[in-house]
Amino acid sequence: MKIRRFPMLVLLAAVVHFPAWSADAPAPVPLKTVARDRILIAGQPSQLDLEQLRQQGVSSIFNLRTSAEMDDRKQVSYDEAAQAKALAYDYVQEPVGGADHPFRPEVLEAFKAQLDRTEGKVLLHCASGGRAGVLYAAYAVKYLGHDPDEAMRSLEPLGGWPLPLERLTGIALKIERRGEDPAAR
């Protein structure tokens, strides 16, 4: 009986040429999102995530990462802005992070403007979802009329609530508007 080796060589060449087929390659991890109406709040999406989200009706991306963060990402992965353009996303990058890029009202207004001009779903993201969650909470308070405490508690799936102080002390905290009489509610 003669053993044919050609098919094995073809298979070996395919595995070497396409490393994702290798048994050692980790499977892609799906992007964890928290959906609030048509807003998806998340950490950094992968290139595959952007392709899949586009197929799921996401038409806009609002990125809170700084240019330095995104430049570092280009070194190890892909250029998100270029990929978003190739997939015909409405793409906005409004950096929030560190002393040079604090949270500011202009960022919230830019996010609201993007929501107003698009009918599809919007991906709101940063590196981990933390900054994106806080921006969503501000949007929920200012434009949806949510109570600040309710808005912050909606971030629990992202790890944004309970606040670290509450976790460390075990004391339940309540967020109130400064100068507002809590009894007037």
Image: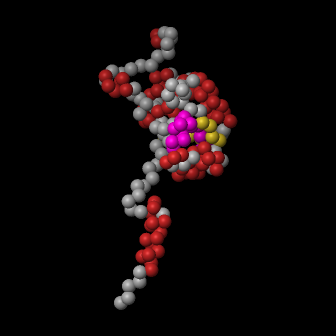
- Confirm whether the magenta stretch covers residue 65: yes
At x 43% / y 71%, what residue is drawn?
12
User: Could one spot residue 41 in this view of the protein?
Assistant: no
In this picture, is 135 found above or below 48? above
At x 53% / y 52%, what residue is drawn?
48
In-front residue for pair 95/56: 95
In this picture, is 82 found above or below 14? above
89 on left or right of 31: right
User: Residue 125's x, y, as percent?
Assistant: 53, 38
At x 57% / y 24%, what residue is drawn?
104
159 on left or right of 184: left
At x 63% / y 30%, what residue is drawn?
110
- Confirm whether the magenta stretch covers residue 17: no
User: Residue 87's x, y, as percent?
Assistant: 63, 50
92 on left or right of 20: right
In-front residue for pair 104/99: 99
> Disc count in the image?
0
User: Could one spot residue 109 in this view of the protein?
Assistant: yes
User: Residue 80's x, y, as percent?
Assistant: 57, 45
In this picture, is 14 found above or below 84? below
Quarter of the image for the N terminus: give it: bottom left
State which region is magenta: 57-73
Residue extending farthest to the bottom is 1
| Quarter-of-image position of residue 121 | top right
User: Residue 140's x, y, as percent?
Assistant: 55, 27
In this picture, is 114 found above or below 48? above
